[in-house]
Image (cartoon, rainbow, N blue to C red):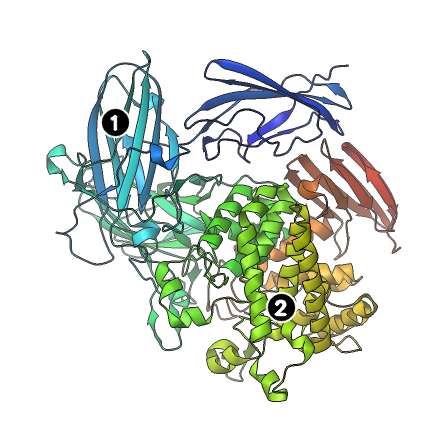
Amino acid sequence: MKSPNPPAGLRVEHAPEPLGVGTATPRLSWRLPEGASVQVSCVIEMESNSQVHRFAQDCDAHILVPWPAEPLASGQAVRWRVQVVTDTGRSAWSEWHRFETGVLDNTEWRARWIGPDEDAEVPGVDRRVWHLRTAFEVPGPVRSARLYTTAHGVYEAFLNGERVGDRELSPGTTSYAATLDVQAHDVTDQLRPGANALCALLSDGWYRGRNGAFQQANQWGDRTAFFAELRITCADGESLIVTTDESWRAAPSQITRADLMSGEARDLRLPLHPLESEHRPVETVTPATETLGWSAAPAVRRVEEIRPVSVTEFAPGRHLVDLGQNISGWIRIAGLGPAGTALKLYHGEHLGPEGDLTTAHLDSDAPGMPRVRFQQMDEVVSAGRPDEVFEPRHTVHGFQYVRVEGHPGPLTPDDVTGVVVHSDLRRTGQFRCSNDDLNRFYEAAVWSFRGNAVDVPTDCPTRERAGWTGDFQLYAPTAAFLYDIAGFGARWLRAVADEQLPDGRVVNISPSTPPERDSNPMLDAITGSAGWGDAAVVVPWILYTAYGDERVLRDQWDSMAAWVDFQTRSAREKRHQSRIDRSPEPAAHEQYLWDGTFHWGEWTEPKTRLDDGTWVDPAMSDPAAWFSADKGEIGTAYFYLSVITLARIADVLGKKKQASAYRDLAEQIRNAWRTEYLSADGRVTSHSQAGYVRALAFGLAPEHLREAVAGHLAQLVGDAGDHLTTGFLATPLLLPVLADVGRDDLAYRLLLQRTYPSWLAMTDRGATTVWESWEGVDEDGNASGSLNHYSKGAVIHFLHTHTAGIRLQEESPAYRRFIVQPVPGGGLTWAEASLDSAYGTIATRWDVDGDRFSLEVRVPPGSSARVILPNGREHDARPGTSTWSCALTRP
């Protein structure tokens, strides 16, 4: 029997047809034909270097299958396809797919690092963009050409005046002293026989530009540099290589100022590519690292365009543009006015009570430090050409509104386009329901992640733009449902490991600039916190369970073990002062309490208000007391989470001895937590919603006390008037915990709460992204903190896992076998969700008609599901679409 349906979705290291694969033995994946439950065998056919090979295997694996052939060489192109035998028969052959390796051995590079001679430039941080250039001859028609590029800074490459590729802000940010990624471009069609020119625009980027809340420049170095190698094969077989070297020349470009944070300025009266006579010799530059690598993460691109909902002239020469959506990106503006017209474009995410753009809420201050003003401002001087357009490419902004100053008018929505810029992640997850308010908040949460996925996961796209570990630790499960973050997450974890301190501490921000890690006593004192450093263990596990990729566990093993070693030493050797005061000699269990080093704690809990309306922030109002407070209950809970997770990881990797040791350690930690922080009646010492949430979510509460612990949690929610009091760490866990202990009614009341503090209060006040703090915009229209922080938006994963019911089973990674267990409630009459998993599309849809519940489930080929209906009945679902119904009653 032969099935006409071929395998589909062929991928190489998580990407469909990658150029620049960074390993000689890439793993292969494909999806089975529709209706197939299991693969019995497969045949992989490969064509490379004019040779064809077939590899037959008797196996059921079709996700991340080990490379079956000899290791590949640098720059080797491969064409491959697959045929499978499943329980439905032999399939047709798949379509051919292609990929190509990058330069796999750093000793093969012939290019040198070069940069402009900037000695004559005025020092400062508002620096111009340089134009680098070389000319070369191609002896005849080109068969293939690959351009490999990277930089200290941000670059755009051009061949014969045409921009190379569609990447933005390349090469992105990284731990420059450890690893720097190269980008590969197919430029075959951009070359011509005879004279050719290769050029680049080079700006400060993350390497030399402003970084972090206090906008410090030159954090990685004070010299930008460019690296390029163009490998050409002519039709007659002749090869040549063009590289960056001393023969290149540099000139100031039309971009007179460029900084990722503060903005870009262009004088369009100057040429984009200066004349050859205006160039001067370059200098060779010593690189930050000799290690050049390759990333499986998708590039940053212009992924969407938005037409403004309004453009209003509120004063002569002053217009306000409203995109209707808070985004990461920039605007493209046409109709720039007569030659010499100078425009200033101020970007922000909020309008003050008077209706004008404000960014005052994004200014930064800290105890003992001066306030740093935040501003995102682009400038352009018109050349007066009728088709003239300004679009920056060496900066990126977080904004919904733009104040345009200096435009002679009229300026209309047809003249302005919002350009959404972020990592080009493949969307995998969707959700909708009968409640439009929930749908609106869901989209706001999605937009928040989009705005904070510019090359690395960040806290906000404005004030800090920093890869805070705690933010991604708690949002990663949500992100892994919404998007394919396999390569994106693995690349970020490499930075986490690169920057881990010798004592095992994980820095708060990755990538993190050297001064933050090496020479700042204040930052050193607040490094190594529970909930933040635990990202080193939690995030690899999330990626493994979502995508079935054991390599990320192997790659991060040393980092994970070092972090747990730090936790273990800290618990054993450090005691909080309150416990020392209680008893100079520690009790036996105290060696497992992680209470003697710094922790951020729950963070950003709802603030209280004084009679005059002033918000009280415990951390800012009394920093010393907040810093020295005992946060051991939280620290020990996360100590347990990391250790028990590392035990599971050791199981997966076959490290039996380590798995047993970590499991024993985890049990000691849990017993210590119970001894110190849990009473016989199920009361947690902190008596906080967050404390009870962790006790239940992490498995700290013993089975016989779970009901009592859940009762205390429910009581606190009720005492708060059906409001939450959780902050940063516990908020994503709150609703799932309530639903799992049978209080889904309370979970939905919290989810649909409209008064402060709540999620819907944000969208009721106009939010199109999720706020950093619950107080983001007050009733008078005043903003505080970032209005685009994805962390509190992690709650939408409850809609995926509980409302729609799509649940991952950790013991069956990549959703090979999963659970569908919807929890209807909140007055919803229908809900639906889908997930494009490694095996294919999972989808659920349920409807409530009176007291009748109906459910439709789609299971992809190669997967199966356990379906649990609201009445407790269980069913097995095989590939295809199945339906069930039941009375809407409790089991």
Above or below residue 505? Residue 610 is below
Of residues 571 and 18, the one drawn nearer to the viewer in this rendering? 571
Q: Which residue is mark 2?
A: 755
Residue 13 percent across, percent down from the top left:
54, 35
Residue at the top extreme, as displayed: 236
Of residues 113 and 30, the one drawn nearer to the viewer in this rendering? 113
- Which residue type carries mark 1? Asn
Q: Between marks 1 and 2, how big is the CA–CA gap?
A: 59 Å
- Relative placement, left or right, of 840 versus 764 is right
Residue 777 percent across, percent down from the top left:
50, 67
Residue at figure coordinates x 59%, y 67% from the top left: 568
Image quadrant in which the C terminus is located: bottom right
How many residues crowd mark 1 within 10 Å: few (<14), some (14–19), many (20+)? some
Residue 654 percent across, percent down from the top left:
67, 46
Q: Quadrant of residue 601?
A: bottom right
Residue 440 can be seen, yes or no: no
Above or below residue 568? Residue 43 is above
Q: Which residue is mark 1?
A: 160
Lower position in the chain sequence, tag 1 or tag 2: 1
How many residues crowd mark 2 within 10 Å: few (<14), some (14–19), many (20+)? few
Above or below residue 517? Residue 120 is above
- Which residue type carries mark 2? Thr
Q: Quadrant of residue 189?
A: top left
